[in-house]
Amino acid sequence: MLDAVVVGAGPNGLTAAVELARRGFSVALFEAKGTVGGGARTEELTLPGFRHDPCSAAHPLAVSSPAFRGLPLERYGLEWLHPELPMAHPFPDGTAAVLARSVGETAASFGPRDAGAYRRLVTPFLHHWDTLVRDFMSLPLTALPRDPVTLARFGLVGLPPSTWLARRFRDERARTLFAGLVAHVMAPLSGFATSAIGLVFALAAHTRGWPVARGGSQAISDALAGYLRDLGGSVHTDYEVKRLDDLPPARAYVFDTSPTALARIAGFGDHYARYRYGPGVFKIDYALDGPVPWTAPEARRAGTVQIGADSAEIGAALRAASRENRAPDAPFLITVQPSVVDPARAPDGKHVFWVYGHVPHGWDGDLTDAIERQLERFAPGFRDRVLARATAGPPELAARNANYIGGDIATGAVSGLQTLLRPKLSLFPYHTPHPAVFICSQATPPGPGVHGMPGHNAAKAVWRRLRQT
């Protein structure tokens, strides 16, 4: 009998399997798709030689993750590549605000009226980042905070809505960039703890950067899988699990799946019936004949580029997708241009380009024209560079990854109390109604992103059970 079986080879399932194998437990991992990766894959979606990331592409949380930083992933081929600027946010007048590694450069891009306010916002947390990120991403109730004073101070700033924090800024440049940071998790700007979301992304850029993985996000997953195999764990792909009886006998079962799928497979009925899924996204991967012709020069040097004319436009786009059940006329866009720093991702002189906009849950329309109209506002002539495009709306995203129900790439709405308390109101979020069954997907704390911390935390809960039996 195995000690543990893990279902789902996304970053969290892989991390959970690795953490258990490191502690000497026998582990087998089962994945429905033909390759490991989940939300961290790389494929030729458009033309031969163009390597695209179907979901995650830039990784501010992965490079800061306590789980990943504790693993020898570099030995298994993972290399982080840092663009000259982590992120840029261009404006219609051809200028841009930036999120640079330097706080000073970032503050200066906001203008003199907000430079000081930004410095005062982030400086108290910069030198405590590694401890802070470990404290708020760790397993609840199992350890006292390492720096409770800084964590409490962060909570006072972060728990209110981002619209409150935006009042610190007098001009639109800083407000717009910060609104875009919040929108990375598809949360309305007025939501609970949205200030924390924006602040986390800003601090991550200043401390560890917003890198891409050389060769694509698949490198993260392949490194985890390679390490797992060296630890004695086994990886089984093309193995769809429809019920617990499909799995070999084990002392514990760990699911990197949506709560809905777990309830169906394990026979938990309506245990997760109140769990809410959020808006979907419409994703386009482009093969380009040259770099994106951004008007703002800063955007040409950035790995990630946010697109939204001002905070009001960003807020309207989020409300349309999350509350008004319609596709926005001017969608807020998150774009990544990996080949700016990793030219091997495309043939000589060519580029790959990654973009998505928010749409309602389960929306089945086509946002291509609206997305490209937005891009043309900030990069005139963009359409002339397009060699090929691969589009995926909510139905296609859900077909590619069963965790993305209704196109929700966060595997659950990041709003209200569910921002922090996922997948249920519980002191033990990784436990389920069955004592030997656990959940470790991004539907559990600390939530979405490629950072492995739900898997890391769930593995601790499993480890404690296995020691007791």
Image (spheres, rainbow, N blue to C red):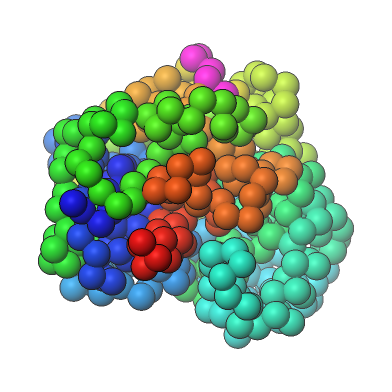
The residue at 77%/39% (across/down) is 312
- In front here: 259 or 194? 259
Q: In this picture, which residue range is highlighted in magenta?
A: 361-365
- In front here: 259 or 5? 5
The residue at 37%/73% (across/down) is 69
Give the vertical position of 245 relative to 251 (above or below): above
Res 142 → quadrant = bottom right
Inspect the magenta stretch and tell me whether residue 180 lies in it.
no
- Whether residue 402 is visible here, answered yes or no, is yes
Quarter of the rendering occupied by the C terminus: bottom left
- Whether residue 439 is visible here, answered yes or no, is no
Looking at the picture, how far across and down is residue 75, in whole percent?
18, 73
Q: Is residue 46 left or right of residue 395?
A: left
Q: Is residue 315 left or right of residue 462?
A: right
- In front here: 359 or 232? 232
Q: How many labels does the image show?
A: 0
Residue placed farthest to the top in the image? Answer: 365
Looking at the picture, how far across and down is residue 163, in whole percent?
81, 50
Give the vertical position of 317 relative to 395 (above or below): below
Q: In this view, does 27 lie to the left or right of 361?
A: left
Q: Is residue 218 left or right of residue 234?
A: right
Looking at the picture, how far across and down is residue 248, in whole percent?
20, 41
Res 166 → quadrant = bottom right
The residue at 65%/83% (across/down) is 147
Looking at the picture, how far across and down is residue 230, in whole percent?
13, 66
- In front here: 380 or 61? 61
The residue at 56%/37% (across/down) is 412
Magenta region's main secondary structure?
Answer: loop
